[in-house]
Image (spheres, rainbow, N blue to C red):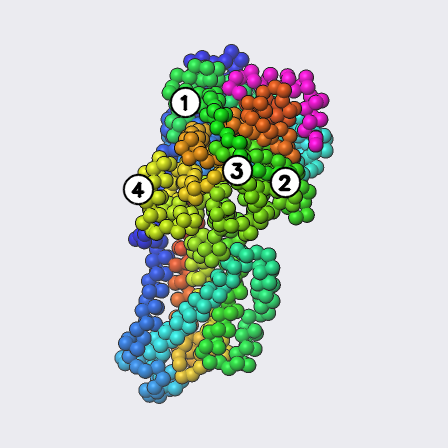
Amino acid sequence: MSKQTSLTEDNPIVLEIRGMRIAVRTDAGDGPVLVDDVSLELRRGEVIGLIGESGAGKSTIGLASMGYTRRGCHIVGGNIIFGDTDIRAISPDARRELRGPKIAYIAQSAAASFNPAHTLMEQVCEAAVRHSVLSPAEARAEAISLFRQLDLPSPESIGSRYPHQVSGGQLQRVMAAMAMVAKPDILIFDEPTTALDVTTQVECLAAFRKLIREHGTAALYITHDLAVVAQIADRIMVLRRGKMVEFGESRQILLEPKEEYTRRLVSERIAGSPFADGAVAADIPILAIDHVSADYPGKPKVIDNVSLEVGKGDTVAVVGESGSGKSTLARVVTGLLPRTAGDVRFNGSSLSPRLKDRAKDQLRRVQMIYQMPDVALNPQHTLLETIGRPVAFYFNRSGREVRTRVAELLSQMDLPESFITRKTSELSGGQKQRVSIARALAAEPDLIICDEVTSALDQLVGEEILRLLKKLQDDLGVAYLFITHDLGTVKRIANKVAVMLKGKMVASGDTATVFSPPYHPYTELLLSSVPEMRPEWLDEVLAARAAGAARTSALLRAP
Amino acid sequence: MRIRGYKVSVTAQIGIAIVVINLLVALLAPLIAPFDQATPLGDAWADADSQHWLGLDNLGRDIVSRLIYGARMSIGLALIITALSFFIGVITGFAAAVAGGWVDQALSRLVDLILSMPTLIFAFVILSVLGTALPVLIITIAILDSTKVFRLARSVAVNIVSLEFVEAARLRGEGWWWIVTREVLPNAIPPLTAEFGLRFCFTFLFIAALSFLGLGVQPPDADWGSMVRDYRDMINFGSAAPLYPAAAIAILTIGVNFVVDWMLSIHSRGQGEGA
């Protein structure tokens, strides 16, 4: 806090938090402390990034700066001073008057924050009009000007659309407009780009930054991605388990982190050291996807004439944005969605299009690991039941043998053997994902399909899962088909990659070849959209895009 | 007070007490009833005295004893009917959700068909045609009730079937029996238990209504609904006789609802713990 950016250090302080403590409080007394002794000063025009893994308390701090806490949580200590009022000291009604016109909030999921039954314009103007900040006509004019500033298409008419008629990235920007209409002093962004594809994320980040700069609004920007916050924040506060780990200027946090925890976060994000050594693949493919097409009944083709081979011990990544058909490809391979054309061969023999026509041994050889470990494991089953079932089901083992095998798999996953009697619902996200892996391995498969396996996990936990998968591959020779949108992961773990765009495969081959020039233009767009840990990155990307704008937009429309 | 680590609210404690006492009375009726339920012991509508705490009824039978035997009949019947309706409703509901397609369509439309007719009138017709023997009564009400259980079980199961652990089981090659009993059922227990309590109350009231109309339990067996019917005229003469069985019905219904509310609150809290 000693140094401040020259831009903002003379500006008045709009929000000051001193020694804030937030705890869970129930009938039984005080529960765990969620936020412990956090202090910050936010000046006009300044953006402070709050960063940390889930459970770090960053969203709790964001909400608390509006004087709001989730149910059961209470602000038990410290001061939150907005302008010259202590938010904790005023009545709930007075606090409600601040939210919206003075302090506005932009949530992660815009889709869940809009009412599908009203037009965007109604919802954007609602708060400002209700709080009598603007007349309805003024609010409309302001909204249209904000739509234009946020680079939304046809700003005059987009307001008459309904939330489902615009894309996710556009909706997120409309939400920013909704927050800005009443010209608040502070904006709170809570992971506003986390749910978006990388290419959309770039557009939203650029729009948010432009908005903040033009209006000189102060902002708290909450995210788990250091590279994202690096583009937008003047200062960064690193949080861990409710405590402040480090607080300083963005450049200092990124380039010279002082604390060990920050250093780990930064190095994991930059690292990019590949696990894959490239020389593993044998000649005979175990999985061959041959000119396959598929669709959902009555809809256009979701995947169109796609071919792909996975060799023994290969890690093949399928990348693309949401809607590109990459998850559908996995469903076709597993037989959940019967293919309409083409062939899928496993170890040389063709697999039936439908799951129920496949032999038990064919099913055993292809296993799957899911994105959300919470719903991929039956919460009512113990680890013994969960991991033991494939062992008993495929290999007809006795109860004792199953137990021994489960214990062996648990130790391979670095999980304590004592967990064997626990229910899966009692585990943390990372532990659950390890159990999912153990369940897949219990079938002794040749191929494991990994569907976004790290994207629901915190960065450091996801990193451990990737390491574990790599180690298992080295030990067991299992092949992976990696479905992901995270190019960082791909570069590190995959030796082959296939890029999908709107159901078609636009590039495939060795990772090194696909990801180095000459690129397919869409690959280049994807690659350049992954945020880098340099504050200048966003400017460079935007400049490069402006230069090649025509080509990029033509590309996004194709094919 | 706590049960399995869950705090038991005051209303839940009252509810549990009411349910337990009623169950004990029903189970031990022959042991604790001072007199036989069907034997006339004196003048009709004799006043209460030290032997007959609530007096005698229209045929000179002991009202206390009839209430105690009535608990046995009313609660026993309601339990059997509810259990049977759950057996039918849960199996068909889960089958519809897991199988989907035409199985789901056929079962759902059949249920719509039954539900489109007013329950009481439907029961009237069947009981008038087939007679009012206890097994007919039980099966008729159980089938009518199972349609409502079907709807709940199906919608609960549809939500569970869409989760990935069920997909994982399908990919493994598991049959539908495993999926229904091992994957879906354990996760459907909390809402189904709560529904069991509520349906028990409705069945209980439905039997009382049928008995009141003369189509339920037949004399000389006592049940609370028919007792209200037999005693109802006495309210004109300032006697409280019809109020005793009516109060028994009301108290048990309230008690069961207290317990159900408590179980529902545990369930909703339990859902939050995953986050």
The subunit carrying tag 1 is A
Tell me which numbered mark, 3 or 4, is placed earlier along the sequence: 3
Looking at the picture, which amino acid does disc 3 mark?
Answer: Ile
Classify mark 4: residues with Cα within 10 Å, few (<14), some (14-19) or many (20+).
few
Q: Is residue A134 left or right of residue A367?
A: right
**Quadrant of the drawing holding the C terminus of chain A:** top right
One can see residue A403 in this view: yes
Classify mark 1: residues with Cα within 10 Å, few (<14), some (14-19) or many (20+).
some
Residue A535 is covered by the magenta coloring? yes
Tags 2 and 3 on a common chain: yes
The disc label shown at residue A292, or none: 2
Tell me which numbered mark, 3 or 1, is placed earlier along the sequence: 1
Quote the CA–CA distance across marks 1 and 4. 30 Å
For mark 4, what is the residue? Answer: A418
The subunit carrying tag 3 is A
Tell me which numbered mark, 1 or 2, is placed earlier along the sequence: 1
Q: Nearer the viewer, mark 3 or mark 4?
A: 3
Residue at 34 percent across and 86 percent down: it is: B39
Residue at 52 percent across and 78 percent down: it is: B127
Looking at the picture, which amino acid does disc 2 mark?
Answer: Val
The disc label shown at residue A286, or none: 3
Looking at the picture, which amino acid does disc 4 mark?
Answer: Ser
Residues A556 and A56: in front is A556
